[in-house]
Amino acid sequence: MTFHRFLQILIASGIALQGSVAQTPPHVPLSVGDAVALVLSHNPAIAESGQAIDASRARAEQIRSGYLPSVDAEATYVFLAPVSVFDLPGESIKVFPNNNYDGHVAVRQTIYDFQKTSSQAGLADSRIALAEDSRESVKRDLEVRTAETFYAILFLRRSIAVQDGQVQTLEEHLAITRKKAEAGTATQLDELTTQVRVAAAQNVRIGLENSLRSAEIALRRLAALPSDTPLDLRGEFSPAVPPPGRDSLLKSALTDRIEARSADDALASARAQQRAAGASDAPSLNASLMYGVKNGYIPNIDILRGNLAAAVDLRVPIFDGNRTRSMEEEATATLRAAESRKEEVTLMIRAEVDQALSELTAAGERVSVSETNINQADLAVKNARLRYGAGSLSNLDLLDAETAAAQARLTNLQALYDVVTGMIRLRRATGSPVAGR
């Protein structure tokens, strides 16, 4: 992937995130590891994923509350009329009062629910693991984007320096050409041709500056930095180091990649969902104990008296409108999808490792070729200047040689940049820290 393609994807991906603004002292040199740590400390997406984990844990606690007793204070008042009365010699006795009061504390506890609660708790735990995987995935994506943006800025700054050198050389050549034109040893066409080359080099520099501003904006947004924060970045474009063998890389990738762990956790969650669905219509055995005061006891039915009630009940679902069967069918489909996802992730990881290895190898070869091209281009410029000074080479040929030398340096920078981004992609593909920390 060329730098310009990367920059387009970077801007189009919408990495601008809203959130709290990080405070960092100006003019503090940042390595790529420092930049990654800064982003992971201040990017709002990290806090968002952390809240999702907290929500999953809270849901798990809600389910586990089924293991604990519930305690309620209850009070009721009921007015009844008419009431039954039976007559005795000398008096009439009400069977129950018109005004009925009842206040009690009730303790209820599930004794056994045939693993209904435990299966739901297991499903909740599996969803915590998925939320944690999601957070790790967010962190890994931010690490990759930060490292790529970091090195994009370094690449652009050095490309601008190379372009500045070319502009300066062309301007010096333009001054010489003008003097020769005034002396009659060069034509007006030579001067115009040189001016065109100067303008073209300046236009390239303007484009590089615009790309640099875009990359710096992207890095500040990733780190939630103020828009005027200086970026003092320190890093080098080192030649590619031969990576370990493909088999070793694949083994590491299938173990360490967050996508592989997430696929395993999704598979475990689907199995937990299947167990929970199967236990949803299980019987439940419950106990309750109530103590309080109420009236209505003969012979003094208006007097509040203490009372105690204890009960055990067994509930066995008989028909639930096919709800359990539908839940089991959903769980089975989810499990099959998770198994397919596991296979797809394995194939994806293998392909990404192979592709990253191929790109890194090609980038390393381009570095070697571009270094040779620089040496050859420098020799060509040296000879061209000697011949131009002797009058045996045209102005246009000298400009071509100087442009080729500048282009050789830019090509070498591009190849070195491709090596660095190739290493980042290989680390990501194998689940290693992308900043080499």
Image (cartoon, rainbow, N blue to C red):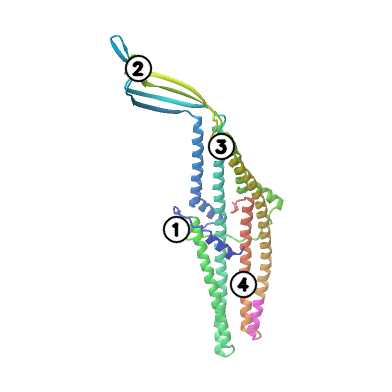
- Mark 1 — residue? 226
- Amino acid beneath label 4: Gln
Q: CB under 8 Å between callouts 4 and 1?
A: no
Q: Secondary structure at mark 1?
A: loop
3D distance between C-alphas at marks 2 and 1? 81 Å
The crowd level at tag 4 (other Cα within 10 Å; few <14, some 14-19, many 20+) is: some
352 lies above or below 64: below
Q: Residue at position x 57%, y 51% from top?
A: 140
> Which residues are the magenta region?
380-391
| Nearer the observer, 59 or 135 | 59
Left or right of residue 77: residue 364:
right
3D distance between C-alphas at marks 3 and 1? 57 Å
Q: Tag on residue 322?
A: 3
| Residue 371, quarter of the rendered image | bottom right
Left or right of residue 209: residue 356:
right
The crowd level at tag 2 (other Cα within 10 Å; few <14, some 14-19, many 20+) is: some
Q: Secondary structure at mark 2?
A: loop
- Mark 2 — residue? 95
- Mark 4 — residue? 407
- Amino acid beneath label 1: Pro
First-in-chain label (3 vs 4) = 3
Q: CB under 8 Å between callouts 2 and 1?
A: no
Quadrant in which the N terminus is drawn: bottom right
First-in-chain label (4 vs 2) = 2
Left or right of residue 372: residue 150:
left
**Is residue 296 visible in this depiction of the protein?**
yes
Q: Residue furthest top?
A: 89
| Residue 128, quarter of the rendered image | top right
